Amino acid sequence: MAASFISLTSFSKPVQDDDSLQWFKKTTSVIAHQLNKAAATYTPGQNPRSVNPDGKVRFAAYKDWTTGFFPGALWYGYELTGDKKLAERAKSFTLALDSVRYLKNTHDLGFMLYCSYGNAYRITGDKAYLPALADGAQHLYARFSPKVGVIRSWDFGPWHYPVIIDNMMNLEYLYWAAKEFDKPAYIYAASTHANTTLKNHYRKDHSSYHVVDYDPATGKVLRKATHQGVTDESAWARGQAWGLYGYTMCYANTKNANFIAQAERIASFIMNHPRMPKDKIPVWDFDVHNALDVEERAPRDASAAAVIASALLELSTQVKDGRKYLSYAEEILKSLSSDAYLAKPDENSFFILKHSVGAFLYNSEIDTPLDYADYYYLEALKRYAAIKKTNLPKI
Ligand code: GLY
């Protein structure tokens, strides 16, 4: 979700009349069209997640980790286009997620609630959104073990106390909730989680393991492995993106120098990776060629690219000279906004972006639209507009 304190950095000049932003104008018209069509086609509670191989839309039930992204995309769509119909639909789709606040068996509450209710509250200031956000943060915090120093990710699988790199995405929610609900313990939990993850999830080359399994009694690391990457030792692309985004937001909320240093190291791993394609949209795992050696098994993952773009834009506002991050993010956004990735109006089952990968080795969501690719693309466009001082419609 967008930080509430996006700063307009000195290296950006107002460019709203610049022809070079034609791509931005074109994409906002596609966004308005696709989101309005999707919101009119589905009923609140029916959150489109991806498209099955048979062409049918897969929906996210309220317990699904992606359930907050469609409402969140509607909120960002409203901010980018000023279309009041999108705000009305965003409200209905958000409120349909009320039951999420009672979930205790998942760490994904940041994705589920902060992207939906969090954006709703940020944009409208309506305090009716706060109770769900308060409950969700409390349940997320309850999954923190001071002994292990991390928030537990999953309650399923053969693990003892699993933590996945994706969990870095929940910390922004806890930092926000600490301030909003006067819960300083949430800051301790979030920063401790980030420190423990920095120590145990990262390799010497600053790529990340996907899963670290801990002994819940002692905090000892039992195993470093993967769930969605091609091998335990590989760099799963979206995992690298989650880490980059997570440490950037940890720094934005704490100003802890270790966090910005880690964010810049991850950015460097991604941006200088020899297998990053020219258009800056990574394949679903940077090491897929080593492991599978088959080009067709390496579809691109637009969702990882969208998360990287959004994170780099935020990072560009947090460092002294963020130009290299801004220009890399701009290249990603231009690629995603090209015909290769951006849907044509009415196509792509009303999703905005094509060509993402959910979980390749499970044969799940390969080369499909994904709700979180759309969400982070819209967030990145909004961050880009703020940095470029582009005039967005008044809302
Ligand atoms: N958080 C699950 C994923 O990134 O696929």
Image (cartoon, grey):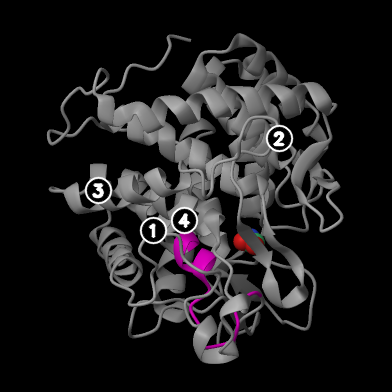
- Circle nearer the viewer, 4 or 1: 1
In the rendered image, residue 150, in percent from the top left (x then y), is placed at: 55, 68
Q: Position of residue 162 (x, y in %)?
A: 65, 75
Q: Magenta segment, which residues?
A: 228-242
The crowding category of the residue bearing disc 3, from other C-alpha atoms within 10 Å (few below 14, some 14 to 19, many at least 20), is: some
Foreground of the two, 146 or 30 = 30
Which residue is pictured at 53% across the width and 55% down the height? 302
Question: On the image, numbered disc 1 is attached to which residue?
Answer: 279
> Whole-Å distance between the Cαs marked 3 and 1?
13 Å
Question: Earlier along the polypeptide chain: callout 2 or callout 4?
Answer: 4
Three-letter code, disc 4? Ala
Report x, y in % for residue 45: 83, 33
Q: Who's the residue at 38% across and 70% down the image?
A: 276
The answer to whether residue 281 is magenta is no
- Mark 3 touches mark 4? (CB < 8 Å): no
Q: Which residue is mark 2?
A: 350
